[in-house]
Image: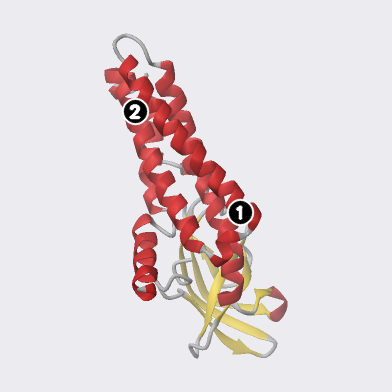
């Protein structure tokens, strides 16, 4: 997705061989990579620099090595690891699509839409916990909580309607703006939960669930494409349209 937005070169390259290709490179951050067996879709550049394609790689491919799970601050159950690709040979039937530049825009709305699900779920739970803590002098947080909840609902509707109508394929910037807005909502939601919970949130045992959500919220800006990358892409689009 970073490649599609012109933010980063692909990190796996292919050389043609007989009826297939030999692949070399690395996928530094892959989620849902079960250690006991997996398939992963990878965007691969042609070594001659002429275009890219999307291929399926498997856990038992010779030359493919999965790292140990990355030592994350949170989300340790997400099976996130790196994959090294050294001389992996694939046949042409392992190619999901021969043209990454046409295939990736078609799947980007679903790809980013599913990523938004984490922001939505995390914000919902933080706001729920904040509401449970209202009272004892914290009633003044009711209005901010309601305001953030309203903004969350608005972005959810925009996401659902945009995906169903297919508008994000032609107008990806609209989806980028939703992703950015949801990331901001998450940070505000966990902040409100902290304020509503008070000092109890900072105690190890009573605050364990909050601390987990706080760490998860810190991951939202980093999900590829990261918030910085989205802002760069939007700025570039705005500049080219000027």
**Which residue position is annotated with label 2?**
192
Residue projecting furthest to the top: 136
- Give neighbour class at mark 2: few <14, some 14-19, many 20+ (Cα, 10 Å): many
Residue 29 percent across, percent down from the top left: 45, 59
Q: Nearer the viewer, residue 76 or 88?
A: 76
Q: Which residue does the image show at 49% across and 43% down from the upper left?
A: 155
Vertical comparison of 3 with 194: above or below: below
Vertical comparison of 34 with 143: above or below: below
Q: Nearer the viewer, residue 137 or 42?
A: 137
Residue 4 percent across, percent down from the top left: 48, 71
Vertical comparison of 242 with 115: above or below: below
**Which residue position is annotated with label 1?**
163
Vertical comparison of 133 with 128: above or below: above
Name the quadrant containing residue 201: top left
Q: Which residue does the image show at 43% across and 54% down from the upper left?
A: 177
The answer for how far apart the CA atoms under marks 1 and 2 are is 30 Å
Q: Considering the numbered disc 2 on the image, is that residue within a helix, a strand or a loop?
A: helix
Q: Which residue does the image show at 50% across and 40% down from the upper left?
A: 154
- Give neighbour class at mark 1: few <14, some 14-19, many 20+ (Cα, 10 Å): some
Left or right: 4 in relation to 16:
left
């Amino acid at each position: 997705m970073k490649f599609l937005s012109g933010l980063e070169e692909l990190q796996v390259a292919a050389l043609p061989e007989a009826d297939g290709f030999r692949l070399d490179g690395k996928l530094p951050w892959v989620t849902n990579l079960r250690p006991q067996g997996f398939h992963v879709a990878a965007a691969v550049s042609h070594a001659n620099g002429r275009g890219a394609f999307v291929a399926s790689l498997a856990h038992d491919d010779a030359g493919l090595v999965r790292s140990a799970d990355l030592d994350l601050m949170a989300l340790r159950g997400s099976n996130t690891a790196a994959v090294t690709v050294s001389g992996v040979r694939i046949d042409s039937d392992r190619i999901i699509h021969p043209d990454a530049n046409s295939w990736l825009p078609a799947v980007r709305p679903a790809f980013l839409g599913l990523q938004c699900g984490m922001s939505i779920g995390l914000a919902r739970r933080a706001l729920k916990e904040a509401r449970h803590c209202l009272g004892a002098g914290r009633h003044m947080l009711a209005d901010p909580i309601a305001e953030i909840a309203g903004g969350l609902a608005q972005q959810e509707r925009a996401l659902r309607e945009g995906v169903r109508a297919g508008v994000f394929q032609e107008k990806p910037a609209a989806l980028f703006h939703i992703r950015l807005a949801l990331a901001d909502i998450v940070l505000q939601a966990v902040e409100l939960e902290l304020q509503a919970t008070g000092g109890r949130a900072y105690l190890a045992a009573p605050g364990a669930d909050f601390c987990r959500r706080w760490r998860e919220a810190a991951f939202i800006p980093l999900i590829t494409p990261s918030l910085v990358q989205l802002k760069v892409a939007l700025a570039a689009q705005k500049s080219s349209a000027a």
